[in-house]
Image (cartoon, helix red, strand yellow):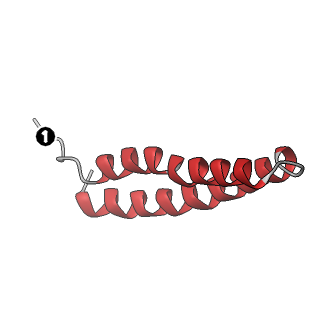
Amino acid sequence: MHPRIKRLIGSFLIVLLVIVYAVAAMVVAEAKLAQSNGFVHFAYFLLSGLLWVLPAMLIVKWMYGAPKKRS
């Protein structure tokens, strides 16, 4: 696949990932953390705010990986 196409697809995937992940994190927080104290909220949003980076790193690694050579 051409590197420009991979980067375009990867960019759309990262934007989609961030949107879906943010909505999912807010839904979980609303459903499970409504009666929790401030420390639990802080810990949850700290963890969930950093956790999206892992799948994003895989997408970026795929985007900027060396193109396969045709035989």
On screen, residue 35 versus residue 49, left or right, reads right
Which residue sits at x=58%, y=53%?
A: 46
Is residue 52 shown above or below 14? above
Which residue sits at x=64%, y=48%?
A: 43
Is residue 71 shown above or below 52? above
Residue 19: quadrant of the picture: bottom right
How many circles with numbers are drawn on the protein?
A: 1
Quarter of the C terminus within the rendering: top left
Work out whether residue 36 or residue 33 is closer to the camera in this orientation and state it: 36
Give the class, few, some or many, for how many residues have Cα within 10 Å of label 1's Cα (few <14, many ≥20): few
Work out whether residue 61 or residue 67 is closer to the camera in this orientation and state it: 61
Circle 1 — which element? loop
Q: Position of residue 42 (x, y in %)?
A: 66, 54
Which residue sits at x=46%, y=45%?
A: 55
Mark 1 belongs to which amino acid? Arg
Q: Which residue of the protein is positioned furthest toward the right in this rendering?
A: 35
Q: Position of residue 6 (x, y in %)?
A: 33, 56
Q: Position of residue 63 (x, y in %)?
A: 31, 53
Residue 9: quadrant of the picture: bottom left
Q: Which residue of the protein is positioned furthest toward the top in this rendering?
A: 71
Q: Position of residue 12 (x, y in %)?
A: 48, 62
Work out whether residue 26 or residue 4 is closer to the camera in this orientation and state it: 26
Work out whether residue 66 or residue 50 is closer to the camera in this orientation and state it: 50
On screen, residue 39 versus residue 5, left or right, reads right
Return the residue at label 1.
Answer: 70
